[in-house]
Amino acid sequence: MANKVLIVEDERAIVEILKFNLNREGYETLEALDGETGLELGRTADPDLILLDVMLPKLGGFEICRRLRDEGSTVPILMLTAREEENDKVFGLEAGADDYITKPFSMRELLARVKANIRRRSLDGSERPASGELTLDEEHFVAAKGGVPVELTQKEFDLLRFLMQAPDRVFSREELMREVWNYDFFGDMRTVDVTVRRLREKIEDDPGKPRHILTKRGVGYYYAR
Ligand code: CA
């Protein structure tokens, strides 16, 4: 499936040239000519990368970036900054951008950055771990449900991540103690049950009828997408 790039840029001419070149390279493109639309599409259109201008009508690029990150989004964001504004690079990275490119940019350079950022994301595994509505931001230890961040303790996060990386595979309590808690000896298995229960309370719509963290009776637990 083609990777989808969201272009948030208010200069029509730049949007057109970006679209033309990205499409030619096989990317799907979406465009937003103002900040509010950009934020909305960033939330709902599930892009694989966002090209984000800094100066935008209605809502600036840094603010968009910050809000998406606050909501738990891990989409790669490549900021388009003005050459004379050295500070833009710092602000952008502080706001959670992955990379930046200064205007005027060479198209070849830009395409290379787009490719590298999408690739890096799929390599480091932070691309949504095939989880329906649940996503993990490994870097910031935040889980998000439908884009809304969920506060987890370190162990809850570790357990969820461990289960999510092997969907449908059942792990015994002993295995989970060893892998998630690093106990090679027999610890108290109730630790696993208690953590599973707390995790369900946080991420399941109905913790009594979980859809994601499931019990295989007499065996252990597994993650269902
Ligand atoms: Ca602009």
Image (spheres, grey):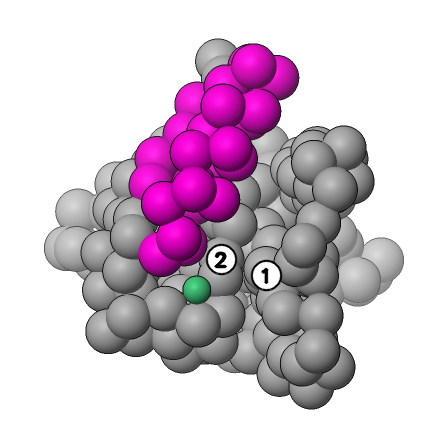
Q: Which residue is denoted by mark 1 in the rendering?
A: 79
The answer to whether 66 appears left or right of 111 in the picture is: left
Specify whether residue 173 is in view.
no
Q: Secondary structure at mark 1?
A: strand
Residue 81 is situated, as x and y percent measured from the top left of the image, at 62, 67
Residue shown at 51% from the left, 33% from the top: 17
Q: In the displayed structure, would residue 132 be above or below residue 79? A: above
Residue shown at 57% from the left, 24% from the top: 21
Q: Nearer the viewer, residue 198 or 104?
A: 104
Q: Which residue is denoted by mark 2 in the rendering?
A: 52
Ligand 1 within 8 angstroms of badge 2 C-beta: no
Residue shown at 28% from the left, 70% from the top: 57
| Callout 1–callout 2 Cβ contact below 8 Å | yes
The answer to whether 179 appears left or right of 67 in the picture is: right
Instruction: Tally the marks.
Output: 2
| Magenta segment | 3-31
Residue 116 is situated, as x and y percent measured from the top left of the image, at 76, 38
Whole-Å distance between the Cαs marked 1 and 2? Answer: 5 Å
Tag 1: residue type?
Met
Along the polypeptide, which appears first: circle 1 or circle 2?
2
Residue 96 is situated, as x and y percent measured from the top left of the image, at 58, 72
Figure quadrant of residue 198? bottom left
- Give the numbered dot on residue 61: none
Residue shown at 35% from the left, 35% from the top: 30
Q: Which part of the image, by quadrant, shows the C terminus?
A: top left
Tell me, yes or no, whether the highlighted magenta stretch contains residue 169: no
Residue 86 is situated, as x and y percent measured from the top left of the image, at 74, 81
Tag 2: residue type?
Leu
Specify whether residue 184 is in view.
yes
Bin the neighbour count of mark 1 within 10 Å (Cα to Cα): few under 14, some 14-19, many 20 and up: many
The answer to whether 114 appears left or right of 61 in the picture is: right
Figure quadrant of residue 180? bottom right
